[in-house]
Amino acid sequence: MSLKSYETVFIMTPVLSEQQIKDTVDKFRKVLTDHGAELVHEESMGLRKLAYPIQHKNTGYYQLIEFNAPPALLTALNTEYLRDERILRHLVIALDKHAVDYNERKRKGLVGKKKQENEEAK
């Protein structure tokens, strides 16, 4: 069974406590690992303003998880997102080789370097 690269971003309701946010993230991390996914990268983006109100909320806690998993996992993950009332929105995207490469470079701090170096040289 081959693993494909995916990235998921989910927005949690802003009324959660720090512990509830941690528990929610742990829950989805466990859903991924229980279904055979290997976690590549995780990033908490914190509380951010939403582009438009969702369920009368103007802000939400953003969480990003990059993972490798069998495609069958997506159905289970989607179901869990829809069942959890703490999740305002979610998105799962498949990453091609270019996106995987970009994410690796971004984690190493190499994205945007050329532009900065050119500005410093002037």
Image: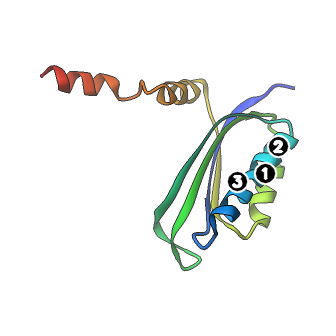
Separation (CA) of disc 3 from disc 2: 17 Å
> Extreme bottom residue here?
56
Closer to us: 77 or 26: 26
At horizontal 21% and vertical 22% (from top left) the residue drawn is 118
At horizontal 57% and vertical 70% (from top left) the residue drawn is 14
Q: Splitting the image into 4 quarters, where does residue 67 fall?
A: top right
Residue 28 screen position, x and y as percent: 76, 51
Callout 2 amino acid: Leu
Q: Say which mark, if any, is on residue 73.
A: 2
Callout 1 amino acid: Leu
Separation (CA) of disc 2 from disc 1: 6 Å
Callout 3 amino acid: Val
Q: In this rendering, would 57 be left or right of 84?
A: left
Closer to us: 98 or 21: 21
79 relative to 44, above or below: below
Residue 8 screen position, x and y as percent: 65, 46
Residue 1 screen position, x and y as percent: 87, 26
Q: Say which mark, if any, is on residue 25.
A: 3
The C terminus sits in image quarter:
top left
Residue carrying label 1: 77
Q: Say which mark, if any, is on residue 61.
A: none
120 relative to 93, above or below: above
Q: Secondary structure at mark 2?
A: helix
Tag 2–tag 1 contact (CB < 8 Å): yes
At horizontal 69% and vertical 68% (from top left) the residue drawn is 86
